[in-house]
Amino acid sequence: MAAARLLLRLAGRLESANFTQTLARPTPSCQRPPFCPFAALDQQPGGSRTELTTNRGVAVAVAVILQSSDQTVLLTRRTCTLPISPNIWVPPGGHMELDEEILECGLRELQEECGLQLPQDQFSCVLLGLWESAYPPRLSWGFPKYHHLVLYILVISQESQQQLQARIQINPNEVSAFMWLGPDVATAVAATEDGTETPRRLLQDLPPSLPATELRDDGGTQPLFLPVSTLLRTTPTTAEDKERVSTGTKFALRLWLQHLGR
């Protein structure tokens, strides 16, 4: 599988880099959602794949699960004008440039989207996993136009959520809001896989809403109280980009919780 070969090559680049902390787990496998449109195409009669764009390639992206010293992680809401996954909550991240290292790409995207530049001696890095992503995310939405391999890395900062929050300056072209997610809510979000429901025992312990920060039209920011139910939504079967947490982000949150021992 081409994705597996690419993962090994990317993992080797991460292992060879001079990080404070490198890989703390075996090379992860590449996973994808059960409703992946490419898997659905494989199950259809011959000829379906010929309708895909012949020059469509697979792009590599890096997403940063930024963990504060008080064990919260940063999520951002993509603007509604973006061509891929508009209005969806994801960690900061983006395409890897030619000859760019994995951590270098993640830190660059973190700075470009959130204005955060981490001091070199105040964070460590762990490879979490690789996710195969398509957009549109379901074949019922139409044939996939974009195909990504998203490498999730955990960047553990020595700074607190409050210290990091004070330095955030979001890029209005890519981000419309941001929030910090703690392990308890992240457990409920990660447990909500598409086609399933969050266990009732988890829902009973959740607040009705969570504090977030939203960008105003004039460029300033304002408080936002985001309903927890928004974070628990699953990918709809019809073509609509409702505000929700992406399936790949749920996958990354599960890996983060495993790293915490939760």
Image: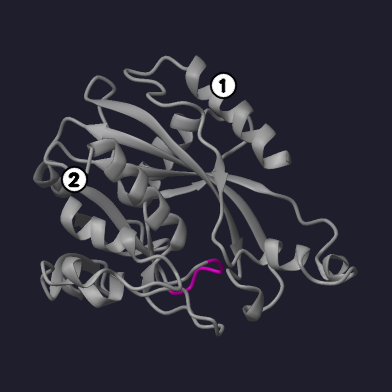
Position in image of residue 243 (x %, y %) = 37, 75
On the picture, is 115 further left or further right than 166? right
Give percent across and percent down for residue 31.
55, 49
Residue 35, quarter of picture: bottom right
Q: Which residue is mark 2?
A: 167
Q: Residues within 10 Å of mark 1 (few under 14, many from 20)?
A: few
Is 198 contained in the magenta span? no
- The residue under the point 10% across, 67% down is 205
x and y percentages locating residue 54 in the rendered image:
85, 59
For the stretch drawn in magenta, the main secondary structure is loop
Give the number of the disc on residue 12.
1
Depth check, front residue: 63 or 49: 49
Quadrant, the N terminus: top right
Question: Residue shown at 66%/74% (left/top)?
Answer: 139
Decide which of tag 2 and tag 1 comes sooner along the chain: 1
SS assignment at label 1 = helix
Q: Residue at x 45, y 73 (%)?
A: 195
Residue 21: image quadrant is top left
Which region is colored magenta? 80-84
Q: For the image shown, how many numbered marks are present on the structure?
A: 2
C-alpha distance separating marks 2 and 1 = 33 Å
Q: Name the amino acid, label 1.
A: Gly
Residue 114 lies left or right of residue 93; in this view the side is left
Q: Nearer the viewer, residue 148 or 232?
A: 232
Is residue 187 at all visible to an observer of this figure? yes
